[in-house]
Each structure stands twice: as C-alpha cells, then as structure tokens.
Amino acid sequence: MLSLWTQLPISENSLEEHPRARILRAAGCNLGLVEQASEVGIGKLGTPAVPEGLRAEFFTGIMPLGGIMPLGDLIDSFLDIVKIADVDGVVAFTAANVYPDHPHAMEQGPTVAHRRARGRGLATLVKQVLADEVAQRYPDIERVTTYNALDNAPMLAINNKLGLVLKFYETNWLKRI
C-alpha cells in the first residue's frame, strides 16, 4: 500500500474538488484519513485549575501508556508530557514536541482521557496544563499547533472550546501497488 500525505487549504469547496485531490484520484488513490491542522496563541488556552484530588505532573521523556490507550506502547516517546492522576492512577495525558527547526511552535500530540474519567473536562485541563508549562519552560514559544482526525468529534469540540483555529487539512491518500 502506498500512502501519500498532502496539505489542502480551507475552501468553500469540498476536499474532493481540490485540484490535488483530482490528480490523486486520477492516479488511482483513495482518500484515507483527513486531519485538520489548528493553532492558537500559547497564552490563549486559559489558566489551568487542577481540582482537589487530582495532581498534574510535567516531565520530559518517554510516556509508557500502561493500558490507558489501546495503542499500547506504539506512541512512546515525546519531548514534553503532562499527566493528570488521581489515587487510582493516570486519568489523562497529553504530549508535545518542540522542534529545533520551529522554535516558536509547540506541536501538541495525542490527548487521552481514561474511560473511567471521561466527561469530567480532564482532556481540556491536561491541554491547558501542558501549554502553561511549555510557555514557562520555552519562552520563545508563541503558538500551539495540533492535528485531529475529522471523525474525532470530542477532541474537535475541545479544541474549538479552547479557541484553536483551523488552518488547513492534512490528507492521507492510499493506493494499492
């Protein structure tokens, strides 16, 4: 399987009608995953308030997922990580990369809330804690960027609530070879 990624701009037309999409379809490719790329100023995510009974921990290194996410240890290495825990263990985490060639942007990676803790605002909280910590540790950071699959409605709603603004679509095209 051949996998090609391309960025498509936001437009009034559907992604399928973009000239790049037409070329890829003509070449025998099918649209696989569509992610939206969004960003917001680093200080615009709000001030985190960790509720009593929870603790937030920021660290740099490898985040063992330990059953919180069905991907196992597939996603196992990020530069900066925040986890929120209660007495029973980790209830939410998120991770970010600050790339040397893009020193003004933090790319936020996966954000996950444990099933037993969903619906309590912890995914929002962990994103806020991470942005706050990164802003303090990396004073040159100006913005947060993130990518989310269009079929991940809960995370798109959280990002919308936090003020992230859609910038473009990242599309994955597949072709059997």
Image: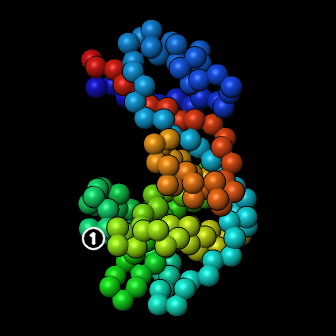
Q: Write down the residue under mark 1.
A: 66
In this rendering, is residue 53 above or below 123?
below
The kind of residue on which mark 1 rests is Gly
Q: Which picture quadrant has residue 114?
A: bottom left
**In front of the other: 120 or 87:** 120
- Residue 67 shown left or right of residue 115 in the figure: left
Outermost residue toward the top in this view: 26
- Residue 58 shown left or right of residue 76 in the figure: right
In the rendered image, which quarter contains the N terminus?
top left
Q: Which picture quadrant has residue 159?
A: bottom right
x 43%, y 35%: residue: 33
**In front of the other: 100 or 57:** 57
x 37%, y 77%: residue: 90
Residue 72 in the image: x percent, y percent? 26, 60
Residue 37 in the image: x percent, y percent? 59, 43
- The structure's colour scheme is rainbow
**In front of the other: 143 or 21:** 21
x 59%, y 29%: residue: 8
In this rendering, is residue 21 above or below 55?
above
Query: Can see residue 18?
Result: yes
Query: Can see residue 97?
Result: no
